[in-house]
Amino acid sequence: MHNLTAPVELFEKITQSDIYKQWQQHHQGKLSHLFCSITADFQAKGNWEVGFFDQETGKITVFTDVDGHFVEKPADDVFKQPTSKVETLDIETVKFSVKDAVNGCKDKLKEFFSSEQIGDGFAIIQTYQNTPVWNFSFITKTLKFINVKLNATTGELVDHQEISLVKK
């Protein structure tokens, strides 16, 4: 495990890589998200994954850094509601740094979910309702998903949720 690194820099490196340029010759993919599995104390469990949505195929192709080399994962179906659309992420709008996003999320977790023991989760940078967001989700020890979305430009709270995984 290692510190959560700056995903914007990774995006820039990936889009300059030969493997991405070759893929782009045959696809009309637009940046849809950056994803990283994280521990409860915000340590990265792996490398950031950068996803590009191809509207023609309706699939997402993910690129990631493996041992200093970029790899392309096979295109996969999109995990979304049938009526929703995949929004393009403009990386230039992501002004709120990893460090600031983590600190902001920690503050909101204390504010909204102080009684929960947080387990592992994930961080996503994506566009949500036309707003670039840092989207942090965790599973708790009481089997709930908790989620905090922060505006990736300003750091302001966009949304927070708690979903119980156990039906009562």
Image (spheres, helix red, strand yellow):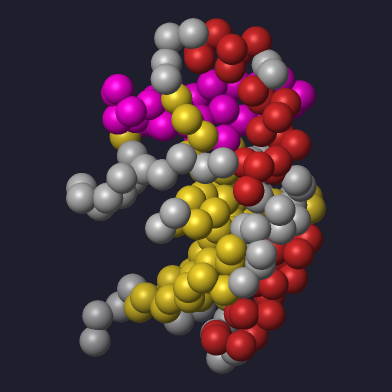
Q: Position of residue 20 (x, y in %)?
A: 58, 17
Q: Which residues are magenta?
A: 50-76
> In which quadrant of the rendered view does residue 114 lie?
bottom right
Tell me the chief SS of the magenta region.
Answer: strand
Report whether 124 appears left or right of 76: right
From the viewer's side, name the closer residue of 43 and 109.
Answer: 109
Q: Residue at x 50, y 13 (%)?
A: 23
Up/down of 133 relative to 33, above or below: below
From the viewer's side, name the closer residue of 150 and 166.
Answer: 150
Residue 72 part of the magenta segment: yes
Q: Residue at x 69, y 18 (%)?
A: 16
Question: Is residue 150 visible from the viewing direction of this image?
Answer: yes
From the viewer's side, name the closer residue of 91 and 136.
Answer: 91
Q: How many marks?
A: 0
Q: Position of residue 59 (x, y in %)?
A: 34, 29
Up/down of 90 relative to 97, above or below: above
Q: Position of residue 93 (x, y in %)?
A: 63, 48
Residue 162 part of the magenta segment: no
Q: Residue at x 57, y 74 (%)?
A: 157
